[in-house]
Amino acid sequence: MTDTPFWRRYARFFGPDPAADVKDELGFHLEAKTEDLIRQGLTPEAARKEAERQFGDLHAVQRIGQRIGQNRERRKRLSDYTQDLLHDARYTFRTLGRDPGFAAVSLLILALAIGANVAVFSVVNTILLRPLPFPHANELVWIAPPPSECGWSCATYSADAYEEFRTMSRAYQDVTGYEAFTTPENFRLTGHGEPVPATGMEVIGNFFQVLGVQPAMGRLFTAEEARGPVVPNSTGTPVVLLANAYWRRQFHSDPAIVGKPIELNGAPVTVVGVLPESFDYGAVFAPGARADLFVPLSLDTERMWGNIVTLIGRLKPGVSVAQALDDANRVTPDMYFNVKYPQSKGRYKGDLVPVPLKDYVTGKLRRSLIALWLAVGTILLIAGVNLSNLLLARSAARAKEFATRGALGASRGRIIRQLLMESLVLSSAGAVLGLGLAFAVIRWLAHQGSLALPLLNSLRIDGQVVGWTVLVAILTAMIFGLLPGLRMASGNLQELLKDSGAGAGLGRQHERIRAGLVISEIALACVLLVSAGLLLRSFSNVLEVNLGFEPDHASSMNVEYDESAPTDEARVLKRTAIFQDVLARVAAIPGVQAAGISDYLPLGPNRSWDTPIPKGKVFAPGELPEPLVYVVTPGFIRAMGMGLQGRDFTWADGPKSERVIIINASMARRFWPGEDPVNKILMRGDEQDRVVGVVDDVHEESVESTLGAQVYYPCTQQGPSRAQLVVRSSLPPAALGTSVLRALRELNPHQPASEFRPMRTIVDHAVSPRRFFMLLVAAFAGLGLLLATLGIYGVISYSVTRQRPEIGVRMALGATAGRVQRQVLGNTLRLALAGIGLGTLIAFVVARAIASLLFATSPWDFPSYLGMALALLLVAVVSGYIPARRASSINPMEALRNT
Amino acid sequence: MDPAKLEFLRGTLDVLILKSLVWGPLHGYAITNFIRRQSDDAFLVEEGTLYPALWRLESKRLLSSDWGLSENNRKAKFYRLTSEGRRRLRQEVKIWEAYAVAVAKVLATTRLPEPEEA
């Protein structure tokens, strides 16, 4: 064998070709054999024939050869590829290690963006996308009329109505409900030292069966028990089901709790089961509240109470919500409010509207969550643009490296692969960090029990979410990472080698791209800032809403009392005496300015009775609103800090004296427009109530809702359903709470250690979803602003570096430092203004889209836009100033010499 | 042909190919000539068997190949032993020798041996 001649080196110029190799090899064999045969004396033709004959099936051998060759080639390519990949990875880690600043900044950007995206998507997924945590949750519907002014009383139904609806409708597998007027800490757990308050829900017996909740231990209520707590079970005591969290907290996860008697309100009850951990009543039906235990609701004892239960139905498989609505409209005309009163037939006409339970639970949050989702997506975009910018700056700095590698034979694909590997390494590392961040945020959020968002307890990062979000994030990072790579690789090698210093075309081209990137980054940040500004303004408007009472310096506590007496009259007297005693003692505590009692407090559960009618006036049925009802003591209005016109109730307004009532301003305007309502008479059936005072409208349903009619009755004339003590004092609630509890215990040793809740907490709880969204969007806007700052700084700083010689020349020709600075700052501001202009246009569109999330704030709210523009201009000036300083301190001689 | 016999032949051919390359690279035709000449024309290697054997050995990395010019200046594919191939050859030769000795001993028997003592 002699050496391969030069032309042979190009024999496989277009890549390996195993088929041709085999052909050549066998061809040579045949020729060599033919020659030998000729030498032995055969004619060339005969020799050729003989050689072929001896060879046998040439094609079969060729095929075998091709197959083996191809396999070998494939293996070789694969091993080459992995070798290259490993090499790229090693190289990437080396180059990133050489530039730790760049690595740290891009990792941070990616981690924040990806972390925020995973966290927000988890929230969106939990609240909006995942079905409710019940089997076949799509069959569950909430049955209620559209929200109205009279609150819970209009969204609930009487016991008779429930039973009639259940038997007459055909759309449901079963219908259930719960008593909607339960307030927190309505039970006392007694029998073990100090009584401990507990929140118990009264549910219709089949509640858990309809929802499809299986007990973790024990059993659910039986059909007999379902008829009410007055019906004893086989051991002769009422029964109770414990919520899982309560069982763990209060009973230390006692595994033998089932069947044990416990004492509630001083009477023995039997624990029949413990509910599973996955069932959290509050998370679904009362966000931010909790339920400790469940007792069966007695429909019979509730029959005279009017509207009392909510309706929840489980549709038959295949029945749509629209069909269920048709069915309800068929049934309601024949339904009675109370079967004893024939005239109450048809009262619920049009009031039974089934909506998917999921919509009832999360519907109000849909827009907010989608807005949040978009905001966090914008952050991802900004982060991507920023990364692109950083990589572009870096690739410009590495232009010579790439050119050299290209000149040494690295293919374009190889260089792109190298860049791809870099962004992949960066984005995966960013994704890992971001996931860590998201886990921390989610863990924290899932334990925010006081946040009035539904389903937060089931908040978690599930694999699907992670996979999806991380995939999107990595793809984004890679696309943005590739942009500079493609530019780099498409560049002319020679020009690059020449141009590595400064000045020529590619550098300028880069700068244009970077300017475009920065402008879009500023525009996106602009949109976020405007949205955050609008939400912030809305939130502050919400906080400034005149609640109708003064939440600061007032706190409330649940008061236990025993008013049992043989006659109604005796009961009223006993209750009046107890309340008077309580208030006298509490008022005697030093620092207490006022104290009063009401059965319901604002921003919590509420109820209404029949509509009173102004005496001597005629109104069409349904024209007057059903007012929310509060039964209060004298002093309550002062303790709440409500404005009063006329007089408050006094203890002298007894059961024997004239019946009195206080109404709110809205009701006064509606019932006696343009007249003084004080001393007017309201008729409720045969009862006459004299209006003695008018109070400010109190926000009852929520801080943001419109105001309806409200009436206040004295507890000396009407029966309150419970007693919530309100104390006004400038003392800190914690200190005051102890003294108040001591005072209450002196009167009633059974008084449980109830929570002493500042009214401010109640208000905060009511506005917590808005605060949550506002804070998140503001955080994203801050992040966007930070990223935009980095972007501006990067591009200006780079252009200053690139223009060093030019600036040097200008300074040599007499430009002052101030002039150079002004010019750099001018460039910065031009970028910022372009971004702000573009961003404002987009923000107009976005603001219109989120208008429904705003409260008392116009989507064109000028201060929000102005604030955004000022903030962006400020960061532009700050981030342009540092490079400007650098530019003006260039030594002209040095800059020129280094050109 | 009997498959068992084919297997035996193929194994033999592999050793012979490895051996033929001990003194340096050869192309396929030279390998057939080498084997034919060294065996005094006893082995006539068929091309249909030789080339697949060569390619298989190459795939197993016992051989490596390179294009070069033959004695009469034609493009030809030359095979050479890899270090792995050399190692394999040494092993195979040992096995073959042991095998041959054993077969020879058996075949050299002239009379029935005495029964072994228990």
Image (spheres, coloured by chain):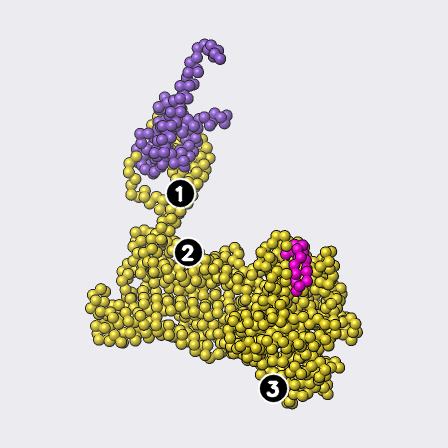
Chain colours: A yellow, B purple
Q: Amino acid at mark 1?
A: Lys
Q: Position of residue A107 (x, y in %)?
A: 39, 59
Label ID, residue A152: none
Q: Does residue A133 show up magenta in the picture?
A: no
In the rendered structure, which segment of residues is drawn in magenta?
A258-274
* Secondary-structure class at tag 3: strand
Q: Earlier in the sequence, mark 2 or mark 1?
A: 1
Q: Earlier in the sequence, mark 3 or mark 2?
A: 2
Label ID, residue A645: 3
Chain ID of residue with mark 1 = A
* Secondary-structure class at tag 2: helix
Main secondary-structure element of the magenta-colored stretch: strand
Q: Position of residue A760 (x, y in %)?
A: 53, 74
Chain ID of residue with mark 3 = A
A248 w.r.t. A743: above or below? above
Chain ID of residue with mark 2 = A
Which of discs 2 and 1 lies nearer the camera? The answer is: 2
**Which residue position holds label 2?**
A429
The residue that appears at 38% across and 34% down in the rendered structure is: B62
Q: Quadrant of the C terminus of chain A?
A: bottom left
Which of discs 1 and 3 lies nearer the camera? The answer is: 3
Determine the CA span between mark 1 and mark 3.
94 Å
Quadrant position of residue A811: bottom left
Q: Amino acid at mark 3?
A: Gln
**Which residue position holds label 1?**
A76
Nearest the camera: A272 or A53?
A272
Do tags 3 and 2 sit on the same chain? yes
Which of discs 3 and 2 lies nearer the camera? The answer is: 3
